[in-house]
Amino acid sequence: MKTELNGVSHYYEVRGNGPEAILFIHGLGGNSNFWYPQAQILARTFTVISYDLRGSGRAELGNEPYGMEVWVDDATALLDQLQIDKVHVVAHSMGTLIAQYFAVSHPDRTLSLTLVGPIIEIGAAGKEGLQARAKTVREQGMEAIADAICDGGLSASTKGSHPEIVALIRDMLMNQPAEGYARSCEALAAARAIEHHQVTVPVLLIAGDEDNTSPYAVARRLNQGFPNAQEITLAQCGHWLSLEKAGQVTSALHDFFCRI
């Protein structure tokens, strides 16, 4: 479905009608379908919301520069439209920074955080790389980077045994609006870390042991920074965890929500 959030048209989906809600936030280069394997199962017991960030997938670009606060405002506007007060926030990659900002900005609306392939503030070299990537896609389009992202972001097992997952992610990347992706890269490069001790809700960190984008050492560091966190590392898994290890991610989410 389409809706306007803060003056920008967004695509979103709602599944299920459970008493508690889950808000899924995708990462850089993703869209709401990134969470489809988890959403269809968890909708049996929860209200599940997934949407495309502005500049990604089927959402419009908008005119203003992107940033964590802008994306948090969009998420908040969507929840307000749906008349949903509190949510379990589940996010991937760049979305995990948005989720962290959401938890700090709206502690009263956050039931828990699940950060899949979690990231922290990007280092200097990574910031330069993101700026260069933004320049590349503006000049050459998404096809210029799609293969490299698939090659570097997926595990050897996925690339060797599951070409259908590689194809899905490649298609997801190549169908991104280049300008939206470029602005997202710039926003990620500019993002700053939150004060992790301020997030007191339960936090689940899910990492892949072959994740070159966000090595599992990042999850370990975050585990030490959040007051109430636990960590899971998935074997033979790269950065696109919800697709590479769909069943394991779904089970981890279900078990986590049942315990809190």
Image (cartoon, rainbow, N blue to C red):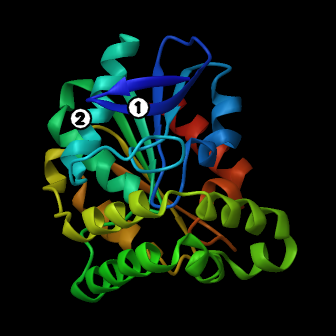
Please say if the residues under marks 1 and 2 sit with CB atoms less than 8 Å apart: no
Looking at the picture, how far across and down is residue 30, in whole percent? 54, 55
Judge from the rendering whether residue 30 lies leftward or rightward of residue 16; answer left or right.
Answer: left
Looking at the picture, how far across and down is residue 194, in whole percent? 16, 56
Residue at the spot 35% in from the left edge and 14% down from the top edge = 81
- The image shows residue 171, relative to residue 255, as above or below, that is below
Residue at the spot 19% in from the left edge and 45% down from the top edge = 69
Q: Residues within 10 Å of mark 2 (few under 14, many from 20)?
A: some
Looking at the picture, how far across and down is residue 10, in whole percent? 44, 33
Residue at the spot 51% in from the left edge and 32% down from the top edge = 11
In this view, the residue farthest toward the right is: 161
- Which amino acid does the dot numbered 1 rest on? Ser
Disc sitting over residue 73 in the figure:
2
Q: Quadrant of the C terminus?
A: top left
- The image shows residue 90, relative to residue 157, as above or below, that is above
- Image depth: mark 1 or mark 2 in front: 1
Q: Can residue 58 be seen at all in this image of the molecule?
A: yes
- Local SS, label 2: helix
Q: Quadrant of the N terminus?
A: top right
- The image shows residue 78, relative to residue 197, as above or below, that is above
Residue highlighted by disc 1: 9
Disc sitting over residue 233 in the figure:
none
Q: CA distance from mark 1 to mark 2?
A: 14 Å
Q: Toward the viewer: 198 or 125?
A: 125
- Which amino acid does the dot numbered 2 rest on? Asp
The answer to which quarter of the image holds residue 243 is bottom right
